[in-house]
Image (spheres, rainbow, N blue to C red):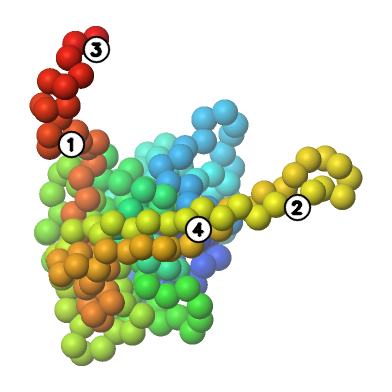
Amino acid sequence: MKILITNDDGIQSPGILSLRDILSRDHDVWVMAPDGDRSGYSHSITLKEPVKIKQKEPRLFSCSGTPVDCIVYGQGGYLEEEFDVILSGINIGPNMGTDILYSGTAAAARQGALKNTPSIAISMNKFVPPFDFDSISEYISTSLEKLVSLWEEGCFLNMNFPEKMDVTCEMKWCRPARRIYKDEVVMFQSPRDEGTYCFLKGNLIQSENDEGSDVKAVQSGHVSISAISLAPSIVPHIGKLSEKAGSVC
């Protein structure tokens, strides 16, 4: 298969390089990834300034834009290739539940699927080294044809891997859990009185881990996989809301 890989951790991340190296044994692999860390960029695209693309090696390109930019330019805006599948990852840290809303990793897979290409976001439930990227890459390599066959139009696949992979690890179909973060803003004044510098920290304060959720599966040592819809959807009880609101248009 011809594969396009991106991520949001940047082209220098060992996760994307592991995925490229292992999949290249059996597939035609191309990489276009951000030239630096773009974590939390979600589905943003660059519109008001040019994007710089630089070839680092054969079939390895850096992009000054966002993860979604990488897919936009990789799917025909720059690379003149037709890809059979798009992979985004391997992300350092999980993208479970409502994390998906913020994730550049997930958004890149969403963008690929919007163009009707099977697309998979891949993340690991670990933030600090040592990282075993190769075990995840081997799993993806072995399972890739099956994963592509599971994909359907109108969705992308979101996968999260446990901290440790072993023989008991199974792939579980899951629904995204609800995860709540408390935003903490750290501020300090510019020494030249140029304003206030602010940094955002997100502390997880509540996470659903009910049976059937992606959080529960990963915490139990399994691989979670979820089919995430591309279409924004209305709440199920919208009819009752419209009756309550009356005519508002």
Question: In what element is the residue under mark 3?
Answer: loop
Kindly indicate the quadrant of the structure image that contains residue 233.
Answer: top left
Question: In what element is the residue under mark 1?
Answer: loop
Q: Which of marks 1 and 4 is nearer the N terminus?
A: 4
Q: Name the residue under label 4.
A: 202
Q: Do the residues labelled 2 and 1 touch (CB within 8 Å)?
A: no
Q: Name the residue under label 3.
A: 248
Q: What residue type is labelled 3?
A: Val
Residue 93 drawn above or below residue 190: below
Q: Which of 119 and 218 is in front in this view?
A: 218
The image shows residue 194 at horizontal and vertical percentages of 82, 40
Q: Nearer the viewer, mark 3 or mark 1?
A: 3
Residue 162 drawn above or below residue 61: below
Quadrant location of the N terminus? bottom left
Q: Do the residues labelled 4 and 3 touch (CB within 8 Å)?
A: no
The image shows residue 139 at horizontal and vertical percentages of 26, 77
Q: Which of marks 4 and 3 is nearer the N terminus?
A: 4
Local packing at callout 4 (Cα closer than 10 Å; few below 14, some 14-19, many 20+) is few
Q: Nearer the viewer, residue 57 or 121?
A: 121
Q: What residue type is labelled 4?
A: Gly
Local packing at callout 2 (Cα closer than 10 Å; few below 14, some 14-19, many 20+) is few
For the residues labelled 3 and 1, the Cα–Cα distance comes to 18 Å
Q: Which amino acid does label 2 sit on?
A: Phe
For the residues labelled 4 and 2, the Cα–Cα distance comes to 18 Å
Q: Mark 2 points at which residue?
A: 188
The image shows residue 137 at horizontal and vertical percentages of 33, 74
Q: Which of 161 and 67 is in front in this view?
A: 161
For the residues labelled 2 and 3, the Cα–Cα distance comes to 45 Å
